[in-house]
């Protein structure tokens, strides 16, 4: 394909993806599947990189860029004030009285909208294009997180219709409840700690240095305010919300204009009842004077506007009896104590179970079986036990003590240094097997095509496998009788399993499912030790000599291979003929031996992967951020902050031609 053809195809793909984004996120009527979307996005990214066609507002910007070492601070042209809040009717009526007294009349209305439990952010558009996004910070200034915000698909990179030259939008980034639960489940699969609630998760995600990771978080956005330099005297908050929708923003459907404070209380009552059924967390109702012309007269305090207030819902609690404490085994062996409760109605549902989080939390709150406890659902997806009602009661049961063995398989539980959770690290533990096998077969691991969750479930149900090592003992005749299988499908699966034996050592290490060992760590371990046997023999101290391996990772790897059942698994993989030694890469030269190179920007002819491979073939390594240990920076167009930092540190910066001269290819 030549550049002209590539440009035409790029425009077609961008149009398709922009329409698909709008249909999915704004109109709730998707017209292509997730897989078709991902394939189109992958094709677009490849063409942009190959032919140098990347732009600021391409849909590929949604997937994030290279990690940033820091966030620049930006000043807000208009202060981002927080809201005063109240929990009772009397204080809300006082607010209404103050508004009426300051204005000297009651010729105004109130706008009511949901108060989201997320992170407040500011967006700036110039000539209709998104140019800046920032956190609220201290209200005067915040962090520039533009690249991270570009990954949120609810935030338009270009506005739908004509807009003022400069436009400022305020809104809330948040996570929906179900998406938050799924994200925590995925983190547990990867051996990562789960988040406490959607609000903390959203705020933390937006401050991550790697926008590619932010892109993987299910963050959404509601716009709730619009700032324009020349606003109409008759502008109302209601009109601004309608205008935001026209520009392409999501605004909350729960919005009403009220003529009196009594009407406001009616809204609060109705929304309080539907709150448990909403897909997102809300902790109250925001009340604003609807007519913007009164804002200047009403003024502000040092912290809050006098024309707005937030009514906060009380935390929803109930009292019940904790009948017993059971243990739940997570997908990667985390043991979570669960309170089995006498059923109680709370926040719109009947609650029978509540999380107790971990052993330390139970001991801190002194929770025991048989206690009368307070259960709360505010700010948490899963109900939690807040406290004990009868801590001084006589004849209480004995304090809780974590058992030494896994309740599912009987294996001894372990706790790594610095962690509060106990874990079962037996890969044959029944609750873990399906997830471990699915991970083993996944694209980034052994890449066994056709072995998805449904097929894994069938294999386990029919007792054809008990661990992922058993995949290599399967025969075609074992698979043919399975549901939705036949001769051809069975043979394809057997072929895919056989093909996986040739996967590289780093993929095998990643596939084993060792906690904290992701793809990058697996590559570093394979590169350093060169064989699985050498890795198994290494102790934690030896592993920490590798730059990317910290004590926690090293301890986890050592604990995994010390387990007898894991040693048996590895032996089965050896017997099956997997590649358990690193294939030696053939170097073209040693011109970059021992040198660390950072790539930034878009190169004229090389893709990022091609440049990375060339650096490695000449003995060098690539790193993601510029530091005093960096030897060279290879910079292309739109290099950004990494180039600036390299110049500050006096690091040699190469153009592509200078790089090619250095390695002898020009």
Image (cartoon, grey):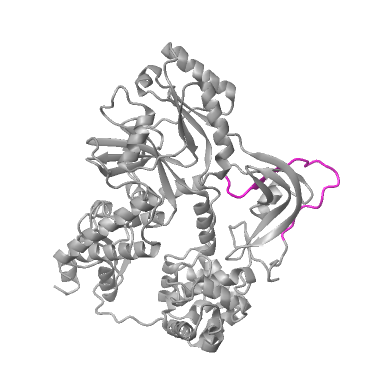
Query: Is residue 569 visible to us here?
Result: yes
Q: Position of residue 487 (x, y in %)?
A: 48, 86
Most common SS among magenta residues: loop
Figure quadrant of the C terminus: bottom left
Q: Which residue is drawn at 52% across and 57% down?
A: 182
Asked if the magenta segment contains residue 398, the reply would be yes
Nearer to the camera, 518 or 176: 176
Q: Position of residue 434 (x, y in %)?
A: 57, 71
Q: Is residue 165 above or below residue 576?
A: above
Magenta range is 380-402
Nearer to the camera, 410 or 37: 37
Figure quadrant of the N terminus: bottom left
Q: Which residue is drawn at 65% across and 47% down?
A: 384
Nearer to the camera, 526 or 648: 526
Asked if the magenta segment contains residue 107, the reply would be no
**Left or right of 333 on screen, residue 387:** right
Q: Where is residue 281 in the image (x, y as percent from the top left)?
A: 52, 43
- Residue at the extreme right of the image, as rendered: 395
Residue 642 occupies which quadrant of the picture?
bottom left
Q: Residue at x 14, y 64 (%)?
A: 4
Residue 10 occupies which quadrant of the picture?
bottom left
Q: Is residue 198 above or below residue 577?
A: above
């Amino acid at each position: 394909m030549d550049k002209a053809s590539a440009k035409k195809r790029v425009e077609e793909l961008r149009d398709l993806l922009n329409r698909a984004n709008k249909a999915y996120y704004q109109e709730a009527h998707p017209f292509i599947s997730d897989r078709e979307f991902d394939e189109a996005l992958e094709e677009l990214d490849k063409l942009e990189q190959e032919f140098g066609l990347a732009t600021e507002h391409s849909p590929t910007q949604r997937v994030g860029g290279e990690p940033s070492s820091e966030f620049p601070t930006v000043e807000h042209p208009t202060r981002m004030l927080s809201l005063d809040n109240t929990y009772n009717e009397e204080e809300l009526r006082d607010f209404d009285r103050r508004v009426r007294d300051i204005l000297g009349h009651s010729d105004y209305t109130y706008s009511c909208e949901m108060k989201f439990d997320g992170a407040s952010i500011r967006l700036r558009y110039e000539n209709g294009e998104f140019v800046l996004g920032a956190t609220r910070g201290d209200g005067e200034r915040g962090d520039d997180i533009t690249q991270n915000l570009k990954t949120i698909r609810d935030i338009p990179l270009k506005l739908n219709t004509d807009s003022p030259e400069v436009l400022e939008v305020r809104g809330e980034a948040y996570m929906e409840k179900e998406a938050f639960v799924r994200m925590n489940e995925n983190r547990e699969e990867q051996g990562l700690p789960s988040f406490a609630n959607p609000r903390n998760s959203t705020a933390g995600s937006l401050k991550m240095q790697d926008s590619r990771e932010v892109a993987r978080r299910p963050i959404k956005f509601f716009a709730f305010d619009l700032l324009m330099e020349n606003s109409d005297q008759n502008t109302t908050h209601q009109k601004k919300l309608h205008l935001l929708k026209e520009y392409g923003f999501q605004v909350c459907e729960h919005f009403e204009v009220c003529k009196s404070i009594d009407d406001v209380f009616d809204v609060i009552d109705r929304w309080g009842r539907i709150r448990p059924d909403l897909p997102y967390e809300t902790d109250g109702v925001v009340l604003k004077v609807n007519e913007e012309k009164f804002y200047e007269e009403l003024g502000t305090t040092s912290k809050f506007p006098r024309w707005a207030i937030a009514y906060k819902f009380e935390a929803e609690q109930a009292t019940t009896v904790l009948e017993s404490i059971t243990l739940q085994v997570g997908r990667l062996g985390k043991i979570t104590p669960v309170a089995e409760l006498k059923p109680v109605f709370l926040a719109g549902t009947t609650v029978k179970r509540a999380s107790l989080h971990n052993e330390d939390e139970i001991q801190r709150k002194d929770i025991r079986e048989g206690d009368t406890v307070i259960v709360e659902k505010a700010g948490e997806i899963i109900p939690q036990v807040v406290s004990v009602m009868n801590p001084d009661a006589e004849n209480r049961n004995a304090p809780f003590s974590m058992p030494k063995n896994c309740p599912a398989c009987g294996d001894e539980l372990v706790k790594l240094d610095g962690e509060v959770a106990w874990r079962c690290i037996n890969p044959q533990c029944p609750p873990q097997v399906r997830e471990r096998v699915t991970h083993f077969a996944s694209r980034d691991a052994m890449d066994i095509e056709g072995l998805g969750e449904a097929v894994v479930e069938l294999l386990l149900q029919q007792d054809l496998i008990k661990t992922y090592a058993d995949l290599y003992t399967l025969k075609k005749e074992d698979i043919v009788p399975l549901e939705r299988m036949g001769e051809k499908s069975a043979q394809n699966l057997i072929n895919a399993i056989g093909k996986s034996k040739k996967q590289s050592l780093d993929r095998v290490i990643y596939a084993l499912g060792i906690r904290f060992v992701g793809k990058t760590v697996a590559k570093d371990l394979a590169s350093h030790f060169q064989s699985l046997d050498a890795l198994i023999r290494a102790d934690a101290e030896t592993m920490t000599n590798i730059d990317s391996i910290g004590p926690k990772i090293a301890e986890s790897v050592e604990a995994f291979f010390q387990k007898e059942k894991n040693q048996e698994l590895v032996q089965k993989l050896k017997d099956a003929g997997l590649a358990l030694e690193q294939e030696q890469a053939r170097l073209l030269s040693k011109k970059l031996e021992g040198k660390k190179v950072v790539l930034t920007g878009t190169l004229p002819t090389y893709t990022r992967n091609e440049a990375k491979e060339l650096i490695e073939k000449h003995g060098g390594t690539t790193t993601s951020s510029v530091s005093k240990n960096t030897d060279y920076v290879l910079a292309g167009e739109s290099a950004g902050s990494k180039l600036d930092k390299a110049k500050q540190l006096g690091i040699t910066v190469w153009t592509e031609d200078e790089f090619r001269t250095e390695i002898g290819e020009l």
